[in-house]
Image (cartoon, grey):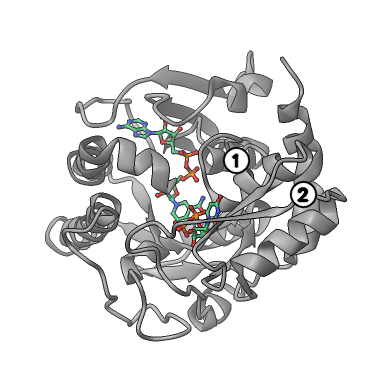
């Protein structure tokens, strides 16, 4: 099948592209390289079934006939979407609409990458897909959260009104090789700081929680969802929940680092807890994550170590 992947040069997009090529598909990857990196696709240079186009999906385009679209384009790290607030709102609205139009034109399947951020600072714990969330519509994170919530509404509208064959995955914090070492997310920050023997920056008191999913598990969940008929959102994430202090401890163990902890201010509206209820993914897709946090960190060690060396 001819598949379009937007955000293909990003962390998740590049892994998804590898998986699709591995299954024999022909992939067109597009990306504006705003937070992505060509290096993530360097190993595919000359691949007979892969083509890359540098483009912004906020400008409408015609990739030719495609059978499936995976829409992953969007800044994802808080410091990046705070830096590119307007671009983030545009890619989550105009960009998603452009890709939905392509799906409508070619009767292509469509899978949209949504996020646990739709739940905001959740009052329900763990978070089920039926929970509507607790989002500040005007706070700093709103550029991402509301773009993603608008995108979900848009995807549902194209499914209901135009009959587009859509799916939505609500992704919870995912990590692994190719996570940009400088994009400010917690795992990349801690791994790089630990490997450089620098203090680990704990925001707030470190008692806020996240639930971390290894990238291979996430990609498997996305592939299974793409083959299902479910139009409503499905959580994909690892329900093992850690405080940020526990996460720092795990990074120190895996890296063998003796770094100190450096406590700094908690960013505004930083959610206090996050844990996916994956009952729906288990029942619908027969999916559950297999890689515990420390094992995933070990699998990521070589990649982050390579990023500490001057290139
Ligand atoms: P990433 O920043 O590594 O990848 C996103 C890619 O989208 C980048 O390569 C970027 O250059 C590209 N992009 C951004 N705006 C674009 C535009 N206008 N046109 C074309 N390309 C554009 O982030 P990621 O972690 O790989 O995230 C991929 C998707 O998954 C995003 O939609 C994100 O919101 C979602 N997601 C990720 C996580 C996670 O933990 N990694 C969690 C929830 C949701
Ligand atoms: N965090 C931290 N130190 C860092 C980076 C992040 O303590 O160097 C915290 C952040 O405040 C949040 C959690 O780790 O509570 C996850 O942050 P991330 O930016 O990875 O993703 P989020 O889930 O907030 O979108």
User: In the displayed image of the protein, which residue is found farthest to the right?
Assistant: 256
Q: Secondary structure at mark 2?
A: loop
Q: Which quarter of the frame holds ligand 1?
A: top left
Q: Which residue is denoted by mark 2 in the rendering?
A: 259
CA gap between label 2 and label 1 equals: 21 Å
Q: Is residue 40 left or right of residue 126?
A: right
**Residue sitting nearer the eye, 92 or 223:** 92
C-beta proximity under 8 Å, tags 2 and 1: no
Residue 93, percent from left and from top? 19, 45
Q: Is residue 218 above or below residue 232?
A: above
76 or 4, nearer to the observer? 76
Callout 1 secondary element: loop
Q: Residue at x 50, y 35 (%)?
A: 10
Identity of the residue drawn at 53% across and 83% down: 279
Query: Is residue 69 in sight in this rendering?
Result: no
* Picture residue at 77% right of the left edge, 40% below the top: 197
Using the rendered image of the protein, determine whether residue 212 is visible from the camera's viewpoint. Answer: yes
- Please name whichever residue, 197 or 170, is drawn nearer the observer in this view of the structure: 197
In percent of width and height, residue 42 lies at 63, 20
The image's mark for residue 179 is: 1
Is ligand 1 within 8 Å of the beta carbon of the residue shown at mark 1? yes
- Indicate the position of residue 311 as horizontal and vertical percent values: 71, 14
């Amino acid at each position: 099948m001819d598949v379009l992947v937007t955000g293909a040069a990003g962390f998740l997009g590049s892994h998804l592209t590898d998986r699709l090529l591995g299954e024999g598909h022909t992939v067109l990857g597009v990306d504006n390289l705003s937070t992505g990196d060509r290096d993530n696709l360097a190993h595919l240079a000359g691949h007979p079934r892969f083509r890359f186009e540098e483009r912004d999906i906020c400008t409408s385009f015609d990739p030719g006939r495609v059978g499936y679209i995976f829409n992953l384009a969007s800044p994802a790290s808080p410091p990046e979407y705070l830096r590119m607030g307007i671009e983030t709102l545009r890619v989550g609205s105009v960009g998603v609409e452009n890709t939905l139009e392509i799906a409508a034109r070619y009767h292509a399947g469509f899978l949209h990458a949504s996020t646990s951020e739709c739940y905001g600072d959740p009052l329900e714990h763990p978070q089920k897909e039926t929970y509507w969330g607790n989002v500040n519509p005007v706070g700093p994170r709103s550029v991402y959260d509301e773009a993603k919530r608008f995108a979900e509404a848009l995807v549902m509208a194209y499914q209901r009104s135009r009959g587009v064959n859509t799916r939505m995955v609500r992704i919870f914090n995912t990590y692994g090789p190719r996570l940009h070492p400088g994009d400010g997310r917690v795992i990349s920050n801690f791994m790089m700081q630990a490997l450089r023997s620098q203090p680990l920056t704990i925001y707030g008191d470190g008692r806020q929680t996240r639930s971390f999913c290894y990238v291979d598990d996430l990609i498997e969940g996305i592939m299974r969802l793409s083959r299902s008929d479910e139009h409503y959102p499905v959580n994909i994430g690892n329900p093992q929940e850690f405080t940020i202090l526990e996460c720092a401890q795990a990074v120190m163990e895996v890296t063998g680092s003796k770094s100190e902890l450096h406590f700094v201010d908690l960013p505004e509206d930083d959610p206090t807890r996050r844990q996916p209820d994956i009952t729906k993914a288990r029942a619908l897709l027969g999916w559950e994550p297999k890689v515990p946090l420390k094992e995933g960190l070990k699998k990521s060690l070589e990649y982050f170590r390579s990023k500490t060396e001057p290139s």
